[in-house]
Image (cartoon, rainbow, N blue to C red):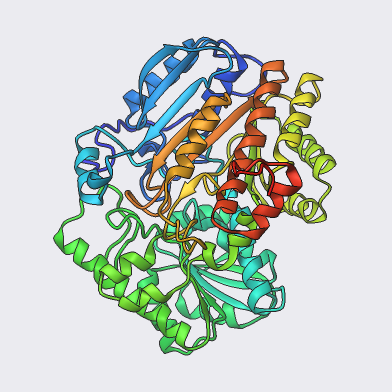
Amino acid sequence: MDPINPLRDGRLGVPAPTGAELRCRGWEQEGVLRCFLNTLDPAVAEDSARLVVYGGRGRAARSWEAYDAIVAALERLGPDETLMVQSGKPVAVLPTHPDAPRVLISTAMVVPAWSDEAEFRRLEDAGLTMYGQMTAAAWFYIGTQGVLGFTHETFAAIARRHFGGTLAGRRVVTAGLGGMGGAQGLAIANLGGRGLIVEVDPERARRRLAAGWVDRIAPDYEAAVADLAGSSDPAAIALVGNIAEILPRLVADGVALDIATDQTAAHDLDHGYVPIGYTPDPARPPDAAYRDAVRTSLRTHANALQALREGGSVVFEYGNNLRAQAVAAGAARAAEFPGFVAEYVRPIFARGVGPYRWVCLSGDPRDLRRSEDAVLDVVRSPSLERWFELARVRVTVQGLPARICWLGLGERHEVGLRLNELVRRGEIGPLALGRDHMDPAAVASPSRETEGMLDGSDAIADWPVLAALLNAAQGASWVSVGNGGGVGVGRSIHTGLTVVADGSELAERKIRRVFWTDPALGVARYADAGYDEATKKAQDTGLDLGTITPFP
């Protein structure tokens, strides 16, 4: 029996419908339906048959029965009704009003004292909840591209900090070619580096090769090392193997490495992190021997990273909870590895900037190009223009055409309004506009996004709860809140939002409200934590921070 989804029936998700014909009673509901189906499209999801989108076991629906019920509910949902979704299962359609959200989603939420992995597994096995990662259960996953911008920004910050602004001639080792880790090779190569990405699942490595996320798969360890060291040209080299075996061997062989990290699904030790001596098998029930092997592999893996760090390599944890898992397994010094947000991305968040994304609901790739041009007309950023040019060449479309870029307060609502106007004029089809959960006010995650906050507020989860309440009040088309995305149950709270831009006045109202106040709350979160960049942004934009005097 499949321990994640015992109700699997051999089905696969189907691609989202395209074109102008509606299956639902309006474009807002249709946008939700198309994004839900797109999330589980086999071209997008990591394991559509098991309803797993990415991140080990992050699902979009609790079961195929729930999947069918979600589709049916969305198809009949009225413009003055809201669908309530409890951990991947629709539970009610309630009367609301047109300016309310069409869907509200809560996933994996457990009373804090019970929010540990063992109790969550028990509840999940009983069919009462599911793990939804971040954008999986929020129905706004767009494939590996969704994290590419974040990955690029992280490695660019590393290049600025340690290597004079470029990775040219630098050699990077990492692991994981899943839905999150798959972007690493392309980001490294785009910045001039030469990366070796170890992946335990040969099918996953082949999938990333076919999509252009890696340049080649080395036939064996010796060939991979020779390839890595044989040139200084940019390249993304995949190697099928277990990182807990490969990394110590690289250390023992004295292979020169400038940067080392990891993006295996280490937050999920039962299904995401495969130990030495085992092959990937998502249906394998983890027993005591398997879990012992996981702990041994974690210690070995972390000790090799520590050896590289002591030898001068830049080593950091890439937000997958590897440090905490390794410490629990007995590798105490893994706690010394810096986290990527606190070390490299925090200044971006402190300005209220984060990953904005949109999906072309028509399925027409021409809409993507036209929408990119419109974004550039509004933002006029040379770096954004370079990113779009690169994405057009290197990023393969997965499912519905989509794009991600980094925008902040004052930009997101203006971009959204321009795009909605293009839809109104018939120049492009309807769009779904939103953002990642890894956004300034959207997540509390003490070992990742909110690690090392200036005021010590790492674990304060009021901010994502406030963000979800705010975006529901402002009428986002759908709003989600979840537990455990990225790092495991009990270790984060996060929220997502999406607005359907169908050219209507209703969409204009929602965009104007949602995409100003959502990033504004992010600025407020960082200003409250003592970040000068955020306070200045509040002053520049006239954001009232609720102080005795309105504008500090």
Foreground: 313 or 271? 313
Which residue is at 71% across, 78% downward?
164
Indicate whether 243 appears above or below 133: below
Q: Could you say which is closer to the camera, residue 319 or residue 251?
A: 319
- Please state the horizontal and vertical placement of residue 6, each as a whole percent of the image: 24, 36
| Quarter of the figure that contains the N terminus | top left
Percent across and percent down for residue 502 are: 68, 21
The reply, left or right, for residue 248 in relation to residue 423 is left
Give the residue displayed 74% in from the left and 43% down from the top: 541
Q: Residue furthest left?
A: 288
- Horizontal and vertical percent position of residue 210: 57, 53
Number of numbered discs present? 0
Q: Residue at x 54, y 82 (%)?
A: 257
Query: 530 above or below 236?
Result: above
Rendering coords of residue 344 (x, y %): 58, 66
- Quarter of the rendering containing residue 123: top left
> Outermost residue toward the front?
548
Apparent side of residue 176 relative to residue 522 in the rendered image (left or right): left
Kindly tell me whether residue 397 is visible in this rendering.
Answer: no
The residue under the point 48% across, 12% down is: 96
Q: Which quadrant of the structure image shows residue 68? A: top left
Classify 290 as above or below 423.
below
- Whether residue 233 is visible here, answered yes or no, is yes
| Nearest to the observer: residue 240 or residue 37 | 37
